[in-house]
Image: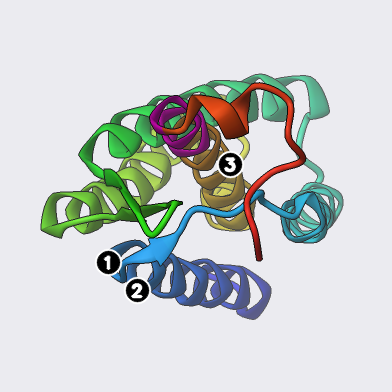
């Protein structure tokens, strides 16, 4: 494992820890700023491209492997969203995950690394899973967030019928 690969893995695991913590704390459901997803997504793409360039990975095979991995991320995000409790408190929708939510985050990252190890070694793209861990987590988080926001909007049909959104 190269130092760059180790760095990618450390960044992904640190981000995972933050995600798990934020999922377990009761928080108001707010209109998500797309800026954070964009910034983390761009960092994830840069990490992926740097890995591919440094390791001379066949782009077609790597993109196909990455597409499968991101589908897996979306599926885990949707499943995790179902484990999150969403309720109204003081006219504001709130959400909170539970132990199952946290476990599913860990399983999701393990599934990503396992899938990419299986595909990566079979197709010659090496340890691409560690280089794409952040991108995987961002996609999974975005899908989970969208589903939770949709569930919250159903709790308060007045707000979801055209007002700008919830307070910050």
Q: Residue 52's spot in the image, x, y percent?
A: 79, 47
User: Mark 3 or 2 closer to N-term?
Assistant: 2
Residue located at (61% from left, 69% from top): 8
**Which residue in the protein does label 1 denote?**
24
- Name above or below for residue 167 compared with residue 68: below
Residue 131 lies in quadrant: bottom right
Name the foreground residue: 56 vs 42: 42
* Tag 3–tag 2 contact (CB < 8 Å): no
Residue topped by disc 3: 142
Q: Residue at x 84, y 56 (%)?
A: 46
The residue lying toward the viewer, choosing from 97 and 117, is 97
Magenta region, residue range: 148-155
Q: Earlier in the sequence, mark 3 or mark 1?
A: 1
Kindly report the distance in space between the C-alpha atoms of the residues bearing marks 1 and 2.
Answer: 5 Å
Which numbered disc covers residue 21? 2
Q: Is residue 131 above or below residue 150?
A: below
- Give residue 163's position: percent from left, percent from top: 73, 35
Q: Secondary structure at mark 2?
A: helix
């Amino acid at each position: 494992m190269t130092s760059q690969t180790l760095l990618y893995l450390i960044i992904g695991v640190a981000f995972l820890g933050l995600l798990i913590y934020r999922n377990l704390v009761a928080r108001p459901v707010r209109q998500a700023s797309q800026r954070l997803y964009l910034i983390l997504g761009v960092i994830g793409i840069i990490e992926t491209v740097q890995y591919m360039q440094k390791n001379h990975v066949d782009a077609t095979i790597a993109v196909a492997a990455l597409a499968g991995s991101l589908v897996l991320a979306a599926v885990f995000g949707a499943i995790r969203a179902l484990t999150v409790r969403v309720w109204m408190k003081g006219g504001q929708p709130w959400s909170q995950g539970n132990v199952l939510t946290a476990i599913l985050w860990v399983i999701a990252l393990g599934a990503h690394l396992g899938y990419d190890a299986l595909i990566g070694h079979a197709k010659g793209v090496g340890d691409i899973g560690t280089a794409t861990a952040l991108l995987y987590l961002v996609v999974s988080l975005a899908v989970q967030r969208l589903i939770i926001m949709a569930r919250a909007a159903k709790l308060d049909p007045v707000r979801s019928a055209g007002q700008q959104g919830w307070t910050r």
